[in-house]
Amino acid sequence: MQWPALRASFDAYSAPQADRWVAIALRTISPALDPDASDEVWAWLHDGRTQTRRALLRLEPCTVSVTQATTRITWTIRAVIFLPLAHRQDAELPACAYAFKPHAGSSTSGAPN
């Protein structure tokens, strides 16, 4: 058995944007799915999507899943509060890192003055 793995993530800035992103992803993959999985997708797009959006507006987490053969794909949508201090790419420093100015008399070597 293989454990679930995060394959990608997306930062949405509102409940409608998160809902729309999942809907676009589902519409994109639906032609490649088997008939049962495609039916799951279209059932959510027509009926489940409204329930998902209402739950998101109440700040309740939601999941949308589709099963294709032996693979189950799940989108988890939840509200989070975060401070954008660090970029998602490790190579980039946050903008505030360049605004730091050492105080007069402080040491940059770590040794006491």
Image (spheres, rainbow, N blue to C red):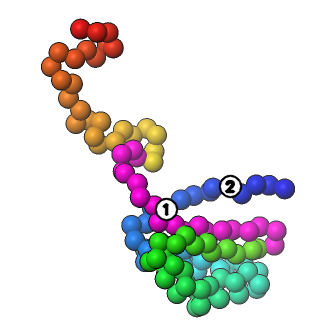
Q: Nearer the viewer, residue 113 or 96?
A: 113
* Amino acid under disc 1: Phe
Q: Of helix, strand and loop, which one carries label 1?
A: loop
Instruction: Identify the amino acid type marked 2.
Output: Ala
- Dot 1 crowding, Cα within 10 Å, few <14, some 14–19, many 20+: few
Is residue 62 left or right of 83 when viewed as pictured? Answer: right
Image mark for residue 5: 2
Q: Position of residue 68 (x, y in %)?
A: 76, 74
Q: Is residue 20 visible?
A: no
Q: Nearer the viewer, residue 110 or 18?
A: 110
Please determine whether, in this image, residue 4 is positioned above or below residue 92. below
Q: State whether the magenta stretch is mostly helix, strand or loop.
A: loop
Locate residue 80, reporting x and y percent: 45, 61
Q: Is residue 58 magenta?
A: no
Query: Are discs 2 and 1 less than 8 Å apart at CB?
Result: no
Residue displayed at 36% across by 38% down: 93
Question: From the image, which quarter does the N terminus lie in?
Answer: bottom right
Residue that extends furthest to the bottom in the rendered view of this protein? 46
Which numbered disc, 2 or 1, marks the residue that appears first in the sequence?
2
Tell me if residue 80 comes above or below residue 97 in the rendering.
below
Magenta segment range? 69-87
* Residue denoted by label 1: 10
- Residue ID at (40%, 71%): 14
- Is residue 81 magenta-colored? yes
Total numbered labels placed on residues in the image: 2
Residue that lies at the very extreme toward the right in this rendered image: 1
Left/right placement of residue 71 relative to residue 58 reads: right
